[in-house]
Amino acid sequence: DNENVQVSRGVIVRMDIDTAGVLGPVIIAPITGAGTQSPLLGAAPHPDGILVTGNGCTATCDSQRVETALYTAAGARPWFRTEPPSAIAYGSAVALNSHGSVVIAVTRREGTALRGYVLGRDANDAQVELFSLPFPASNQDSEASAVAIDAFDRVSGGGYRIVGGVTEA
């Protein structure tokens, strides 16, 4: 019975900072392949619109993947990238440097552990992978939850890791 199936779609609402008025259309992330659910968890400005990241998963979410996209103000999606699926996978934050590189803080399950990563992708070609670095590095659970790029294009990541059963944040 498909009438009772609930799905979660990512939503982008552009607002005026002074009035909180909605600017233009509300953008709802389209269904992509088997990914019927796609909450958005992070966003960053881009000269052509807004970069977003989050996760996409099947109706039961037994298979998840990080999804990152660029949306224009009109709601078009000219750039879209997915990462390999995992039992748990989501992007928490995204940033753009001055050379057009997209940096994404992601977490995914590898075996029995959560692993945080900082990923670098080319904003001009969604299929170009620049780097994939464990962050923060740990043999136990870790999660990358924030990323920022400074005026000199240096990447800073935030998150936590567990070392010897103790959380380091």
Image: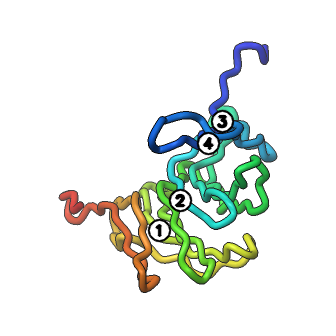
Dot 3 and dot 1 residues touching (CB under 8 Å): no
Q: Identify the residue at image location x=42%, y=66%.
A: 147
- Closest to the camera, between mark 4 and mark 3, is 4
Q: Secondary structure at mark 2?
A: strand
User: Which numbered tag is attached to residue 12?
Assistant: 4
First in residue order: circle 2 vs circle 1: 2
Mark closer to the observer (3, 2)? 2
Q: Is residue 34 left or right of residue 119?
A: right
Q: Amino acid at mark 2?
A: Ala
Q: Which residue is mark 1?
A: 117
How far apart are the two marked residues, 3 and 1, measured between alpha carbons? 24 Å
- Residue 48, given in percent of the width and then of the height, sits at 69, 63
Q: Are marks 2 and 4 in contact (CB under 8 Å)?
A: no
> Which quarter of the image is occupied by the N terminus?
top right
Crowd around label 4: few <14 · some 14–19 · many ≥20 (10 Å): some
The disc, 1 or 4, on the residue closer to the chain's N-terminal end is: 4
Q: CA distance from mark 2 to mark 4?
A: 12 Å
Q: Is residue 3 above or below residue 129?
A: above
Q: Which residue is mark 3?
A: 9
Give the mark, 3 or 1, whose residue is nearer the N terminus: 3
Question: Which is more N-terminal, label 2 or label 3?
Answer: 3
